[in-house]
Amino acid sequence: MVAALPATAAEALDSVELGDVVQSLGLASEDFGEFVRAALPGLLRYGHALAGNPHDAADLVQGVLERIGARWNSVVRRTGDPMAYARRAMANAHVSRWRRTRRESLVADLPDTGAVWQPERFAAEPLWQALRALPPRQRAVIVLRYYEDLSEAEIARTLGISRGTVKSQANKAMSALRTRMGATEGRDR
Amino acid sequence: MTGQSDDHSDDHRPDPDDVPNGPELDDELRKLFADDRLSLPVSRDAGAAVVAGAQRRRRKRMALATTGGVLAMAAVVFAGAMLSGLVHPVHRVNSAGPVLSTTAVTPTKAIGPPVPTPTPATTSSPEVEQVLGPYGLGDLELGMSWQKAVASGELHESAPVLSAGCLRYTVALEPIPTTTPSIAPPVPVTRSAGAAGAPSKVAEVVVSVRDGLVQVIAGPMLRTPEGVGVGSTKDDLSEAYPKAALPPRGGSTNVEVVKNPMAVYVFDVSGAGTVTSFSLRMAKTDCLG
């Protein structure tokens, strides 16, 4: 389900000499750089779905990738699948709302400079707005279910909560969405 | 025990029975999440920024592991000893037997009011990678025998005996990304001493020789499944556990564990309304750490 790599992203990353930097870290050589290059577009997109806005998405992705990079060997060895690990870590980081201060975004090229992305139109989607209003955990459950297409059991494992909680959070989220959608549809459709 | 014993009727995805969903909302959500506009442009320096950030975190971790960690461990161990009444004012320490001999703490600060708890600064590691779930921490489950707990290989650095038959250990699980966030001041709380690559401390456990594992005391990077951990606010707490009785001026509060009637969560809340520590504990135990 990882989105295809946008050409812009690929081009942008080509210019970055990741290999050198990584080598100097004593990390697992170019692997981490490669991983970042390949993973960023998909993770940003996923982070956008999770966090509800580009800034927090970038923050989420950056934080998680940095932590993974700092322990790259161990992540690879233990999980065998850093991408899946990154996505789980993002879901959890989102839920835990660890981010108390917003950092300057270094990862995503955000709207004020980029002409490609059109925030206004998307942000105006009633469903998107309704999603943004959900509490983090409910939102995570919805994203894992409809974006990641995970089963209830997989969601429970990912977030470390019970299946019952997944179910109740999903129920709450869906009825909140329904209510909000109903409200907006009355007005502006 | 075959087939049916697996009580999960798994994997029929959008549970048809659970929500008054209607298929439309499902579809709309899928459509929304497939929307191209969800993609974000990757900035030019993204890769370098991430790698540099990783480098920073790695360095910080190493520094903590080799310096701050030693002090932090000593402080935690010592505070634990204070609590259990094992440590007495200065002049007694030398004769207190082997209990403190490994920690080499100079107990000058120990006189005066008892140290409340090994309280990590509330700003430390507000990241979550590990969940202290209803039954325990990973393979370390409440109620497992002392022998099994020890055999798990996850217990380290036995700390002073809390009371007869009760032992306290550090757990080093090496959770993945558990570096301190770069924006926070370095708070030497969570690292055990050791060289690079040494396992990091994520919790402490109290094991009763008689009752087995009775308590898991969470380190700052652990959270409950409901997302509460060190640094959470009172509001977080009551949002996650509506039934929790919040001590108005700080103190500790017990919360039932939904999936495990044998256990409770105990949250210590500061006067300012922040969770300073928490643990998962057998509801009934003679060992209190």
Image: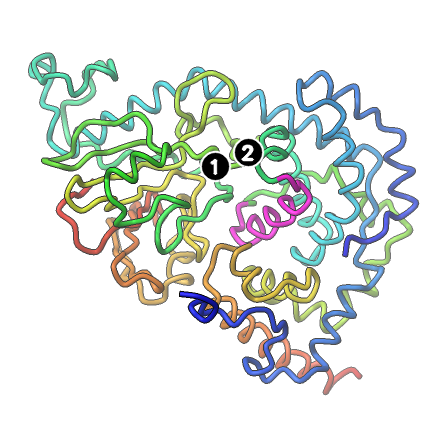
The number of numbered badges drawn on the structure is: 2
Q: Residue at x 92, y 45 (%)?
A: A7
Placement of the N terminus of chain A among the 4 image quadrants: bottom right
Q: Main SS type for the magenta part?
A: helix
Residue B223: mark in rendering: none
Residue B151, position as x, y percentages in the image: 32, 34
Q: Tell which subunit mark 1 falls on.
A: B
Badge 1 crowding class, 10 Å Cα cut-off, few under 14, some 14 to 19, many 20 or more, is: many
A159 or A117, which is in the foreground? A159
Placement of the C terminus of chain A among the 4 image quadrants: bottom right
What element does badge 2 sit on?
A: loop
Residue A5, position as x, y percentages in the image: 86, 47
Does A163 sit above or below residue B226? Answer: below
Residue B217, position as x, y percentages in the image: 31, 41
Does B134 sit above or below residue B12? Answer: above
Q: Residue at x 71, y 54 (%)?
A: A46
What residue did someone put label 1 on? B125
Q: What residue type is disc 2 on?
A: Pro
Q: Which quarter of the picture shows residue A124?
A: bottom right
Q: Which quarter of the picture shows residue B237?
A: bottom left
Q: Which residues are magenta?
A: A80-98
Mark 2 touching mark 1, by CB under 8 A?
Answer: yes
Q: What residue type is disc 1 on?
A: Ser
| Residue B89 relative to residue B203: left or right | left
What element does badge 1 sit on?
A: loop
Q: Which quarter of the picture shows residue B209?
A: top left
